[in-house]
Image: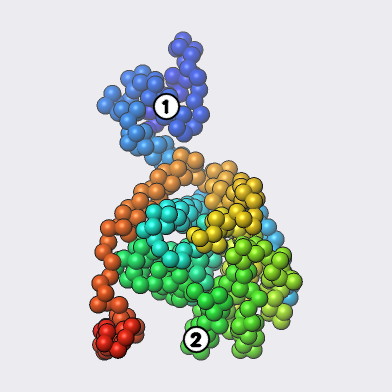
Amino acid sequence: MRKMLAAVSRVLSGAAQKPVRQPRAGLEFLEFLSSAGSSCLGLPECWDYSHPLKTRDASRVLVASRNFANDATFEIKKCDLHRLEEGPPVTTVLTREDGLKYYRMMQTVRRMELKADQLYKQKIIRGFCHLCDGQEACCVGLEAGINPTDHLITAYRAHGFTFTRGLSVREILAELTGRKGGCAKGKGGSMHMYAKNFYGGNGIVGAQVPLGAGIALACKYNGKDEVCLTLYGDGAANQGQIFEAYNMAALWKLPCIFICENNRYGMGTSVERAAASTDYYKRGDFIPGLRVDGMDILCVREATRFAAAYCRSGKGPILMELQTYRYHGHSMSDPGVSYRTREEIQEVRSKSDPIMLLKDRMVNSNLASVEELKEIDVEVRKEIEDAAQFATADPEPPLEELGYHIYSSDPPFEVRGANQWIKFKSVS
């Protein structure tokens, strides 16, 4: 590699040589290698730089040869606080390793949701389907701020959380297409996916919030140093059961982080038309709260760490409002442009996209190169395509398994079907 770079330097600096335009870093440099020829650079004749695979290999060599920074410090937006004297820090350190991990995870969620959109329009995915593209900083940032042993429960926009809690894209897409290889054996669909310490995916608006308080009660009862993240949307924020859960969690000092994902629209109704007060982080009244930039993964991560530490200290619940935005409509049946303009969506995409924000930070701070992130994009696309092929080729579960998995560890028993003469066997 050193010989190659030295040869390039000689070619570029030699006065007697034919003038050569100095290429910029990245793909243009690789094009230069291809046009200049390998022999004049002292490189092997057998290395064909015009070949796409060889170009990718050369790109990897260049990335490996660069001296990237191990970490960088960034300023982040200050959170608005309620009943708190101090909030999360306004600066944070991002390591190269974490940055690349976050970028890959967010890009995977984005591409997975776009593939789900495509499969739905092809009528391979049917029924309800709520996509979360645009909100990737929420699911990835929340996961980055807690431990794998902590717990999370959410509403029906759950694909991203299912992935960040540890399930593969293959299992998620197969569940969306109703196949045996899905994470719920093809019987849950878009709104009912589960993983270890992840309790769904719940279809009834707001109903998961009392369940999240119950999970937090179990954490305290069992004496475990664990917290439960209980998520709901701005559309559910006016539900009475949410305030009942607030009250019980505060009385019993439960380690519960109530999280309102405020994407500005509950179905097709803007928050201004639905709520007398849109300060959702103050809705707990007697419960402390903070409002967070939900489009910035570093803001979400630091706020989650702060909230988790607060709960673990025994002070009781805390409330977070994540200000975010969804690019798709409420569900696949909603085009998403009858109650907001295309210009509004495009403005958010161009100024606040969570993936773009992280990418710019990493490149500008020498934590990664554009070429390296493009390589991740290519790998993610391939992973999504492979998962989609599996999700369309895997068989559907047979009818006789309709009653399976009602209980986790019970002996087999019969389940009545649509009428008394139809019986299904239930196996745990």
Name the image quarter holding the C terminus.
Answer: bottom left
Q: Mark 2 packing: few (<14 Cα in 10 Å), some, or many (20+)? A: some
Q: Nearer the viewer, residue 196 or 336?
A: 336
Question: x, y percentage for residue 288?
Answer: 69, 76
Q: Nearer the viewer, residue 97 or 382?
A: 382
Q: Which residue is mark 2?
A: 218
Q: Is residue 428 above or below residue 159?
A: below
Question: x, y percentage for residue 339?
Answer: 64, 57
Q: Residue at x 64, y 51 (%)?
A: 341
Residue 258 lies in what quarter of the image?
Answer: bottom right
Three-letter amino acid code at the position of disc 2: Ala
Q: CA distance from mark 1 to mark 2?
A: 60 Å
Q: Which residue is mark 1?
A: 31
Three-letter amino acid code at the position of disc 1: Glu
Q: Residue at x 39, y 48 (%)?
A: 381
Secondary structure of residue under mark 2: helix
Name the image quarter holding the N terminus.
Answer: top left
Q: Mark 1 packing: few (<14 Cα in 10 Å), some, or many (20+)? A: some
Residue 237 lies in what quarter of the image?
Answer: bottom right
